[in-house]
Image: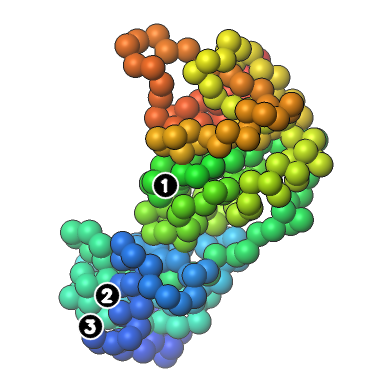
Amino acid sequence: MKRLSEHICENTVIAGINSPEVKAARDLLGAKRHPGDQSLFICEGLWAAEKLVKKGIEVVSVFYDSEYYSENGKAPEAEFELLELVCSKAENIYSISPKACAKISDREGADACFIIARMPEIKAKDIKLSENMLAIVLDGQEQPGNIGAIMRSLDAAGGDFAVLTNRRVKVTHPRLIRASLGSAFMMPVLDMDIDSLISWLRDNHFRIILTDLTATRNFCDIPAEGRVAVVAGNEHTGISPVWRTLKEAEPVIIPMLGSVESLNVGFASTLVAYNIGLRQKGLMN
């Protein structure tokens, strides 16, 4: 039977259900973030293990279910390998009970592993500019699931980075991390005030694409070449008014063929990003 390596066994600390370590992990998954290190985020399950290691993200702590990953437990061999991988990079390794797993988790059917990592801080100067680029600006969005899904779509479309402005949600929000499937830490994500962002986009010659129900230009007809930033606004109020005053702004419309007037901001962003991304990569005319 598969068993944990000497590295894990020798470096593991047993953490009880009421220990400060389990409480801190629970706080990271909770609906309201508690004061503390705001750069920390938590992933429930081992889905992020390979991505975190590949990207070189700092892994602060790993919690694993001592029964599930025991020699007589139910964990398949592939999970042991992922656990070994992420624990090899972790600063702290904790063995916890199934009840402690349930206490940490914010959903029914708690997973058997939790990974706490540190989100890297990315500044505009860290973005490596190239001739053709695709970015999405998330302006005042409030739903962490929507934000994460848009980041996932941007990543899948070959996008280069995302920007949060008028931020209402931290990029370390657990639902955002989960919905992004790791794109929130695999892809550069900037946090900028709107004036600084507009100046930076202008200085670096980005075209600014706005989805607008009053526009006449079809989103499929805009050029894809060059540096392009697609602005995705708040789910209820839309984009900030200042975007419409910019000479660089290019309003486009997504045709509605049925009875609805518009798409969810995540779907709209995905359509526009994929259209531009595929053409920038030469995969669509």
Residue topped by disc 2: 65
Residue topped by disc 1: 142
What is the x, y in percent for residue 188?
62, 52
Choose mark 1 or mark 3, whichever is in front: 1
Task: Establish if 230 lies above or below 49.
Answer: above
Choose mark 1 or mark 2, whichever is in front: 1
What is the x, y in percent for residue 229?
65, 35
Secondary structure at badge 2 equals: strand
Secondary structure at badge 3 equals: loop
Q: Residue at x 50, y 44 (%)?
A: 140
What is the x, y in percent for residue 113?
33, 69
Q: Which three-letter amino acid code belongs to the residue tagged 3?
A: Ile
Decide: few, some or many residues near mark 2? Use Cα within 10 Å; few <14, some 14-19, many ≥20: many
Q: Which three-letter amino acid code belongs to the residue tagged 1?
A: Glu
- In the figure, is residue 207 to the left or right of 80? right
- In the figure, is residue 180 to the left or right of 227? left
Which image quadrant: the C terminus? Answer: top right
Check whether the beta carbons of the residues at disc 3 and disc 2 lie within 8 A of each other. no
**Earlier residue among tags 1 and 2:** 2
Q: Which three-letter amino acid code belongs to the residue tagged 2?
A: Asp
Residue topped by disc 3: 17
Closer-to-camera residue (220/140): 140
Distance CA(mark 1)–CA(mark 3): 33 Å
Viewer can see residue 232: no
